[in-house]
Protein backbone atom coordinates (compact mmCIF):
# COMPACT_ATOMS: atom_id res chain seq x y z
CA UNK A 1 0.00 0.00 0.00
CA UNK A 2 1.31 3.44 -0.90
CA UNK A 3 2.69 5.57 1.93
CA UNK A 4 2.28 9.13 0.69
CA UNK A 5 -0.20 9.91 3.42
CA UNK A 6 -0.58 11.64 6.78
CA UNK A 7 1.63 10.14 9.44
CA UNK A 8 -0.95 9.31 12.08
CA UNK A 9 -4.01 8.71 9.88
CA UNK A 10 -2.77 8.04 6.36
CA UNK A 11 -0.30 5.42 7.54
CA UNK A 12 -3.16 2.91 7.37
CA UNK A 13 -3.81 3.66 3.71
CA UNK A 14 -0.83 5.67 1.65
CA UNK A 15 0.18 13.09 -28.09
CA UNK A 16 3.00 14.42 -25.94
CA UNK A 17 6.17 16.09 -27.09
CA UNK A 18 5.85 19.56 -25.64
CA UNK A 19 8.81 21.91 -25.76
CA UNK A 20 9.05 25.06 -23.68
CA UNK A 21 11.89 27.19 -22.37
CA UNK A 22 13.93 25.26 -19.85
CA UNK A 23 11.50 22.33 -19.70
CA UNK A 24 11.99 20.34 -22.86
CA UNK A 25 9.67 17.35 -22.96
CA UNK A 26 10.25 15.31 -26.06
CA UNK A 27 9.46 11.71 -26.88
CA UNK A 28 12.68 9.75 -26.66
CA UNK A 29 13.50 7.30 -29.44
CA UNK A 30 12.77 3.80 -28.27
CA UNK A 31 15.77 1.82 -27.13
CA UNK A 32 15.84 -1.73 -25.89
CA UNK A 33 15.64 -0.45 -22.32
CA UNK A 34 12.70 1.93 -22.90
CA UNK A 35 10.87 -0.80 -24.80
CA UNK A 36 11.34 -3.07 -21.80
CA UNK A 37 9.99 -0.36 -19.51
CA UNK A 38 6.99 0.19 -21.78
CA UNK A 39 6.14 -3.49 -21.92
CA UNK A 40 6.42 -3.89 -18.16
CA UNK A 41 4.32 -0.82 -17.37
CA UNK A 42 1.70 -1.89 -19.90
CA UNK A 43 1.37 -5.16 -18.00
CA UNK A 44 0.97 -3.29 -14.68
CA UNK A 45 -1.81 -1.05 -16.02
CA UNK A 46 -3.62 -3.79 -17.89
CA UNK A 47 -3.55 -6.05 -14.82
CA UNK A 48 -5.00 -3.32 -12.59
CA UNK A 49 -7.80 -2.74 -15.09
CA UNK A 50 -8.45 -6.46 -15.62
CA UNK A 51 -8.67 -6.95 -11.85
CA UNK A 52 -11.13 -4.03 -11.75
CA UNK A 53 -9.00 -2.03 -9.38
CA UNK A 54 -8.89 0.79 -11.92
CA UNK A 55 -11.40 1.94 -14.51
CA UNK A 56 -8.81 4.00 -16.37
CA UNK A 57 -5.75 6.16 -16.09
CA UNK A 58 -2.84 7.95 -17.73
CA UNK A 59 0.78 7.24 -16.79
CA UNK A 60 3.69 9.36 -18.04
CA UNK A 61 7.38 8.91 -17.27
CA UNK A 62 10.05 11.48 -18.15
CA UNK A 63 13.81 10.96 -17.78
CA UNK A 64 16.29 13.81 -18.27
CA UNK A 65 13.55 15.88 -19.89
CA UNK A 66 12.52 13.17 -22.35
CA UNK A 67 9.27 11.24 -22.20
CA UNK A 68 10.20 7.56 -22.11
CA UNK A 69 6.72 6.20 -21.41
CA UNK A 70 3.21 7.45 -22.11
CA UNK A 71 0.04 5.40 -21.88
CA UNK A 72 -3.67 6.07 -21.57
CA UNK A 73 -5.47 2.87 -20.55
CA UNK A 74 -9.00 1.79 -19.76
CA UNK A 75 -12.05 4.03 -19.83
CA UNK A 76 -12.59 7.69 -19.07
CA UNK A 77 -16.31 6.84 -19.02
CA UNK A 78 -16.96 3.12 -18.67
CA UNK A 79 -20.74 3.29 -19.01
CA UNK A 80 -20.51 5.10 -22.35
CA UNK A 81 -17.44 3.14 -23.54
CA UNK A 82 -15.38 6.31 -23.87
CA UNK A 83 -11.75 5.25 -23.80
CA UNK A 84 -9.12 7.10 -21.80
CA UNK A 85 -6.99 9.57 -23.78
CA UNK A 86 -3.71 11.25 -22.86
CA UNK A 87 -5.51 14.60 -22.95
CA UNK A 88 -8.37 13.46 -20.71
CA UNK A 89 -9.14 16.10 -18.07
CA UNK A 90 -9.18 15.01 -14.42
CA UNK A 91 -10.37 16.56 -11.21
CA UNK A 92 -6.94 17.05 -9.69
CA UNK A 93 -7.92 17.23 -6.00
CA UNK A 94 -4.67 17.61 -4.01
CA UNK A 95 -2.47 17.64 -7.11
CA UNK A 96 -3.73 21.25 -7.09
CA UNK A 97 -1.40 21.92 -4.16
CA UNK A 98 1.68 21.63 -6.37
CA UNK A 99 0.39 24.43 -8.63
CA UNK A 100 -0.43 26.69 -5.68
CA UNK A 101 2.90 25.99 -3.99
CA UNK A 102 4.76 26.82 -7.19
CA UNK A 103 2.82 30.08 -7.49
CA UNK A 104 4.05 30.88 -3.98
CA UNK A 105 7.60 30.04 -5.10
CA UNK A 106 7.33 32.58 -7.92
CA UNK A 107 6.16 35.26 -5.47
CA UNK A 108 9.06 34.38 -3.15
CA UNK A 109 11.42 34.70 -6.11
CA UNK A 110 9.95 38.12 -6.92
CA UNK A 111 10.37 39.26 -3.33
CA UNK A 112 6.67 40.04 -3.02
CA UNK A 113 6.42 37.86 0.07
CA UNK A 114 8.81 36.01 2.36
CA UNK A 115 8.71 32.72 4.20
CA UNK A 116 8.75 34.41 7.60
CA UNK A 117 5.94 36.84 6.77
CA UNK A 118 3.01 36.41 9.17
CA UNK A 119 -0.21 35.44 7.43
CA UNK A 120 -1.89 38.42 9.10
CA UNK A 121 0.25 40.73 6.95
CA UNK A 122 -2.02 39.72 4.10
CA UNK A 123 -5.09 38.37 5.91
CA UNK A 124 -5.47 40.56 9.03
CA UNK A 125 -8.53 38.67 10.25
CA UNK A 126 -6.95 35.23 10.03
CA UNK A 127 -6.28 34.75 13.74
CA UNK A 128 -6.99 31.15 14.79
CA UNK A 129 -6.17 30.32 18.38
CA UNK A 130 -4.81 27.39 20.31
CA UNK A 131 -7.18 25.52 22.63
CA UNK A 132 -5.89 27.58 25.58
CA UNK A 133 -6.92 30.81 23.82
CA UNK A 134 -3.39 31.84 22.81
CA UNK A 135 -3.11 33.47 19.39
CA UNK A 136 0.18 32.34 17.82
CA UNK A 137 1.90 33.71 14.74
CA UNK A 138 1.39 31.64 11.59
CA UNK A 139 3.85 32.29 8.76
CA UNK A 140 3.94 31.60 5.04
CA UNK A 141 6.44 28.81 5.73
CA UNK A 142 3.99 27.20 8.17
CA UNK A 143 1.33 27.15 5.45
CA UNK A 144 3.63 25.73 2.77
CA UNK A 145 5.05 23.05 5.08
CA UNK A 146 1.73 22.12 6.73
CA UNK A 147 3.13 22.95 10.16
CA UNK A 148 0.49 25.63 10.86
CA UNK A 149 -1.71 23.63 13.23
CA UNK A 150 -4.63 23.81 10.79
CA UNK A 151 -6.57 20.60 10.09
CA UNK A 152 -8.82 19.04 7.40
CA UNK A 153 -12.49 18.33 7.98
CA UNK A 154 -12.10 14.80 6.59
CA UNK A 155 -9.55 14.04 9.32
CA UNK A 156 -11.81 14.73 12.28
CA UNK A 157 -14.95 13.08 13.72
CA UNK A 158 -18.36 14.18 12.46
CA UNK A 159 -18.81 16.35 15.56
CA UNK A 160 -15.39 18.00 15.20
CA UNK A 161 -14.83 21.78 15.15
CA UNK A 162 -14.42 21.99 11.36
CA UNK A 163 -17.77 20.24 10.89
CA UNK A 164 -19.41 22.55 13.41
CA UNK A 165 -17.92 25.61 11.69
CA UNK A 166 -19.10 24.43 8.25
CA UNK A 167 -15.58 24.36 6.81
CA UNK A 168 -15.23 23.07 3.25
CA UNK A 169 -12.39 20.72 2.26
CA UNK A 170 -12.69 22.02 -1.32
CA UNK A 171 -14.04 18.72 -2.67
CA UNK A 172 -17.73 19.15 -1.94
CA UNK A 173 -20.22 21.64 -3.32
CA UNK A 174 -20.51 24.76 -1.22
CA UNK A 175 -22.14 28.11 -1.77
CA UNK A 176 -19.62 29.96 0.38
CA UNK A 177 -16.76 32.12 -0.91
CA UNK A 178 -13.04 31.52 -0.47
CA UNK A 179 -12.94 34.37 2.04
CA UNK A 180 -15.78 32.84 4.04
CA UNK A 181 -14.12 29.43 4.09
CA UNK A 182 -10.90 31.00 5.35
CA UNK A 183 -12.92 32.81 8.03
CA UNK A 184 -14.45 29.51 9.13
CA UNK A 185 -11.04 27.83 9.25
CA UNK A 186 -9.83 30.71 11.43
CA UNK A 187 -12.72 30.18 13.85
CA UNK A 188 -11.65 26.61 14.66
CA UNK A 189 -8.91 25.89 17.22
CA UNK A 190 -5.42 25.02 16.04
CA UNK A 191 -4.14 21.53 16.74
CA UNK A 192 -0.72 22.64 17.95
CA UNK A 193 1.67 25.57 18.22
CA UNK A 194 2.71 26.41 14.64
CA UNK A 195 6.09 24.98 13.74
CA UNK A 196 6.10 22.27 16.41
CA UNK A 197 4.47 19.41 14.52
CA UNK A 198 3.14 18.39 11.10
CA UNK A 199 -0.43 17.91 9.95
CA UNK A 200 -1.72 17.64 6.39
CA UNK A 201 -4.33 20.35 6.21
CA UNK A 202 -6.24 23.18 4.60
CA UNK A 203 -3.08 25.30 4.90
CA UNK A 204 -2.83 25.42 1.11
CA UNK A 205 -6.34 26.87 0.84
CA UNK A 206 -5.32 29.64 3.23
CA UNK A 207 -2.14 30.07 1.18
CA UNK A 208 -4.31 30.52 -1.91
CA UNK A 209 -6.11 33.41 -0.21
CA UNK A 210 -2.73 34.92 0.73
CA UNK A 211 -1.25 34.80 -2.76
CA UNK A 212 -4.44 36.32 -4.16
CA UNK A 213 -3.97 39.27 -1.78
CA UNK A 214 -0.27 39.53 -2.59
CA UNK A 215 -0.97 39.57 -6.33
CA UNK A 216 -4.12 41.67 -6.26
CA UNK A 217 -5.92 39.12 -8.46
CA UNK A 218 -8.53 36.43 -7.84
CA UNK A 219 -6.83 33.09 -7.23
CA UNK A 220 -7.61 31.63 -10.69
CA UNK A 221 -6.00 34.70 -12.24
CA UNK A 222 -2.92 34.31 -10.06
CA UNK A 223 -2.41 30.68 -11.08
CA UNK A 224 -2.92 31.59 -14.72
CA UNK A 225 -0.52 34.54 -14.61
CA UNK A 226 2.25 32.86 -12.60
CA UNK A 227 2.02 29.20 -13.67
CA UNK A 228 -0.24 28.01 -16.45
CA UNK A 229 0.29 30.80 -18.99
CA UNK A 230 4.10 30.87 -18.66
CA UNK A 231 4.16 27.08 -19.00
CA UNK A 232 1.84 27.11 -22.00
CA UNK A 233 -0.92 25.12 -20.31
CA UNK A 234 -4.34 25.14 -21.93
CA UNK A 235 -6.41 22.74 -19.81
CA UNK A 236 -5.24 23.37 -16.23
CA UNK A 237 -7.19 25.69 -13.97
CA UNK A 238 -10.28 25.95 -11.80
CA UNK A 239 -12.75 25.44 -14.65
CA UNK A 240 -13.10 22.75 -17.32
CA UNK A 241 -12.12 23.80 -20.84
CA UNK A 242 -13.82 20.89 -22.62
CA UNK A 243 -16.50 18.99 -20.73
CA UNK A 244 -16.41 16.16 -23.26
CA UNK A 245 -12.86 15.32 -22.09
CA UNK A 246 -13.62 15.29 -18.34
CA UNK A 247 -13.18 11.83 -16.83
CA UNK A 248 -16.00 10.23 -14.88
CA UNK A 249 -14.81 9.58 -11.30
CA UNK A 250 -15.26 6.16 -9.69
CA UNK A 251 -14.76 4.66 -6.25
CA UNK A 252 -13.64 1.12 -5.51
CA UNK A 253 -16.39 -1.32 -4.62
CA UNK A 254 -17.17 -5.02 -5.11
CA UNK A 255 -17.23 -6.49 -7.68
CA UNK A 256 -16.10 -3.40 -9.63
CA UNK A 257 -15.68 0.36 -9.15
CA UNK A 258 -18.88 2.42 -9.14
CA UNK A 259 -19.33 5.90 -10.64
CA UNK A 260 -19.47 8.62 -8.00
CA UNK A 261 -22.87 10.19 -7.51
CA UNK A 262 -23.21 13.84 -6.69
CA UNK A 263 -22.65 14.24 -2.93
CA UNK A 264 -20.85 10.91 -2.64
CA UNK A 265 -19.36 10.04 0.76
CA UNK A 266 -16.53 7.52 0.56
CA UNK A 267 -14.66 6.17 3.58
CA UNK A 268 -11.00 5.17 3.33
CA UNK A 269 -9.76 3.75 6.61
CA UNK A 270 -10.55 6.33 9.30
CA UNK A 271 -11.30 9.14 6.85
CA UNK A 272 -14.54 10.02 5.08
CA UNK A 273 -14.28 12.18 1.98
CA UNK A 274 -17.25 14.20 0.76
CA UNK A 275 -17.11 14.30 -3.03
CA UNK A 276 -19.19 16.50 -5.31
CA UNK A 277 -18.01 15.68 -8.84
CA UNK A 278 -20.24 18.43 -10.24
CA UNK A 279 -18.15 21.02 -8.39
CA UNK A 280 -15.67 20.99 -11.28
CA UNK A 281 -18.46 22.23 -13.56
CA UNK A 282 -19.86 24.86 -11.20
CA UNK A 283 -18.57 28.34 -12.07
CA UNK A 284 -19.81 29.61 -8.69
CA UNK A 285 -17.74 27.15 -6.64
CA UNK A 286 -15.01 28.93 -4.72
CA UNK A 287 -11.47 28.24 -6.02
CA UNK A 288 -9.94 25.76 -3.59
CA UNK A 289 -6.16 26.16 -3.81
CA UNK A 290 -5.66 22.74 -2.28
CA UNK A 291 -8.24 20.64 -4.10
CA UNK A 292 -10.22 22.57 -6.71
CA UNK A 293 -8.23 22.42 -9.93
CA UNK A 294 -8.64 20.33 -13.07
CA UNK A 295 -6.01 19.37 -15.61
CA UNK A 296 -4.36 16.75 -17.78
CA UNK A 297 -1.45 14.38 -17.20
CA UNK A 298 0.80 16.06 -19.81
CA UNK A 299 0.37 19.44 -18.12
CA UNK A 300 0.96 18.00 -14.65
CA UNK A 301 4.16 16.45 -16.01
CA UNK A 302 5.22 19.84 -17.32
CA UNK A 303 4.81 21.28 -13.82
CA UNK A 304 6.81 18.41 -12.30
CA UNK A 305 9.68 19.03 -14.67
CA UNK A 306 9.59 22.67 -13.58
CA UNK A 307 9.68 21.57 -9.94
CA UNK A 308 12.66 19.35 -10.77
CA UNK A 309 14.62 22.06 -12.58
CA UNK A 310 13.15 25.40 -11.47
CA UNK A 311 13.28 26.84 -14.97
CA UNK A 312 11.57 28.65 -16.53
CA UNK A 313 9.68 29.95 -13.48
CA UNK A 314 12.23 30.24 -10.68
CA UNK A 315 15.89 29.65 -9.94
CA UNK A 316 17.36 26.34 -8.82
CA UNK A 317 18.15 28.04 -5.49
CA UNK A 318 14.46 28.69 -4.85
CA UNK A 319 13.65 25.08 -5.73
CA UNK A 320 16.35 23.86 -3.35
CA UNK A 321 14.45 25.65 -0.58
CA UNK A 322 11.10 24.29 -1.77
CA UNK A 323 12.42 20.73 -2.05
CA UNK A 324 14.23 20.53 1.31
CA UNK A 325 12.71 18.81 4.34
CA UNK A 326 11.21 21.44 6.65
CA UNK A 327 9.79 19.28 9.43
CA UNK A 328 12.92 17.89 11.07
CA UNK A 329 12.43 14.44 12.53
CA UNK A 330 8.66 14.51 12.13
CA UNK A 331 7.23 12.23 9.46
CA UNK A 332 4.60 12.91 6.82
CA UNK A 333 4.78 9.17 6.07
CA UNK A 334 7.30 6.41 6.83
CA UNK A 335 10.69 7.69 5.69
CA UNK A 336 9.26 11.00 4.44
CA UNK A 337 9.58 14.54 5.67
CA UNK A 338 7.88 17.51 4.02
CA UNK A 339 9.16 20.46 2.05
CA UNK A 340 7.29 23.55 0.90
CA UNK A 341 4.37 21.92 -0.85
CA UNK A 342 5.09 18.18 -1.07
CA UNK A 343 6.59 15.23 0.76
CA UNK A 344 10.37 14.73 0.65
CA UNK A 345 11.84 11.24 0.99
CA UNK A 346 14.54 11.37 3.66
CA UNK A 347 15.03 7.66 4.39
CA UNK A 348 14.39 5.26 1.47
CA UNK A 349 15.10 2.24 3.68
CA UNK A 350 12.47 3.28 6.22
CA UNK A 351 10.04 3.90 3.37
CA UNK A 352 10.97 0.59 1.69
CA UNK A 353 11.32 2.50 -1.54
CA UNK A 354 13.76 2.24 -4.47
CA UNK A 355 13.53 6.01 -4.89
CA UNK A 356 16.50 8.24 -4.14
CA UNK A 357 16.70 10.29 -0.99
CA UNK A 358 15.28 13.70 -1.87
CA UNK A 359 12.48 12.30 -4.04
CA UNK A 360 9.40 14.55 -3.99
CA UNK A 361 5.90 13.14 -4.08
CA UNK A 362 2.20 13.69 -3.43
CA UNK A 363 -1.16 12.87 -4.95
CA UNK A 364 -4.87 13.51 -5.02
CA UNK A 365 -7.87 11.83 -3.45
CA UNK A 366 -9.72 11.47 -6.76
CA UNK A 367 -7.08 8.82 -7.55
CA UNK A 368 -3.72 10.40 -8.43
CA UNK A 369 -0.05 10.19 -7.53
CA UNK A 370 3.14 11.85 -8.72
CA UNK A 371 6.81 11.79 -7.85
CA UNK A 372 10.01 13.54 -8.90
CA UNK A 373 13.42 11.96 -8.27
CA UNK A 374 15.94 14.77 -8.87
CA UNK A 375 18.94 12.46 -8.49
CA UNK A 376 17.65 10.27 -11.32
CA UNK A 377 16.29 13.22 -13.36
CA UNK A 378 12.98 11.37 -13.23
CA UNK A 379 9.36 12.63 -13.17
CA UNK A 380 6.34 10.32 -13.05
CA UNK A 381 2.62 11.14 -13.25
CA UNK A 382 -0.18 8.70 -12.45
CA UNK A 383 -3.65 10.20 -12.95
CA UNK A 384 -6.58 7.79 -12.63
CA UNK A 385 -10.33 8.11 -12.30
CA UNK A 386 -10.57 5.53 -9.50
CA UNK A 387 -10.19 6.10 -5.75
CA UNK A 388 -8.74 4.98 -3.44
CA UNK A 389 -6.73 2.67 -5.75
CA UNK A 390 -5.16 5.58 -7.63
CA UNK A 391 -3.85 7.27 -4.47
CA UNK A 392 -3.63 4.63 -1.74
CA UNK A 393 -3.66 1.37 -3.69
CA UNK A 394 -1.17 -1.17 -4.98
CA UNK A 395 -0.97 0.51 -8.40
CA UNK A 396 1.26 3.26 -7.00
CA UNK A 397 4.01 0.96 -5.77
CA UNK A 398 3.59 -1.29 -8.81
CA UNK A 399 4.29 1.59 -11.18
CA UNK A 400 7.10 2.94 -9.01
CA UNK A 401 8.89 -0.39 -8.66
CA UNK A 402 8.50 -1.19 -12.36
CA UNK A 403 9.97 2.16 -13.36
CA UNK A 404 13.05 1.69 -11.19
CA UNK A 405 13.51 -1.91 -12.30
CA UNK A 406 13.62 -0.85 -15.95
CA UNK A 407 15.29 2.56 -15.90
CA UNK A 408 17.42 3.02 -19.03
Image (cartoon, rainbow, N blue to C red):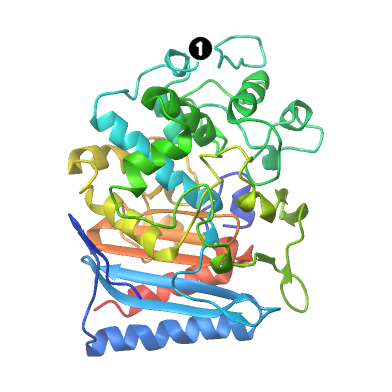
Q: Residue 138 placed where, x, y %?
A: 47, 19
Tell me if residue 325 can be seen. Answer: no
In this view, which residue lies farthest toward the right?
A: 159
Residue 378 lies left or right of residue 171; in this view the side is: left
Q: Can you tell which quarter of the image residue 353 is in?
A: bottom left
Q: Residue 153 placed where, x, y %?
A: 69, 37
Say how many tags the image has.
Answer: 1
Q: Residue 134 placed where, x, y %?
A: 59, 9
Q: Is residue 391 above or below residue 185?
A: below
123 or 373: nearer the eye?
A: 123
Q: Residue 122 placed where, x, y %?
A: 44, 17
For label 1, the residue is 124
The C terminus appears in which quarter of the rendering?
bottom left
Q: How would you rate the neighbour count of disc 1 (Cα within 10 Å): few for under 14, some for 14-19, many for 20 or more? A: few
Residue lying at 21% horizontally and 83% vertically, measured from the top left: 29
Residue 253 lies left or right of residue 146; in this view the side is: right
At mark 1, the secondary structure is: loop
375 or 330: nearer the eye?
A: 375
Residue lying at 64% horizontally and 63% vertically, measured from the top left: 387
Q: Is residue 339 above or below residue 57?
A: above
Tell me if residue 373 can be seen. Answer: yes
Amino acid sequence: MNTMCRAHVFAVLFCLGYALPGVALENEKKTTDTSSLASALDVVLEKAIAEQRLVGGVVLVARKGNIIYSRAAGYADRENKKVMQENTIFRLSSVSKAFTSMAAAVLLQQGKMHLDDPVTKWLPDFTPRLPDGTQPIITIQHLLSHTSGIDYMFSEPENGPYHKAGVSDGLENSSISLAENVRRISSAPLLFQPGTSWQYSLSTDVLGAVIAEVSGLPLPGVIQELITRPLGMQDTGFSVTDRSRLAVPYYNAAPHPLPMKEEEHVTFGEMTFHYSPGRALDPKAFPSAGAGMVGTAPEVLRLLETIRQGTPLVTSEIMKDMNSNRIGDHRAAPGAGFGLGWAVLVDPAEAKSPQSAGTLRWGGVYGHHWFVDPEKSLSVVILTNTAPEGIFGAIIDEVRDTVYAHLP
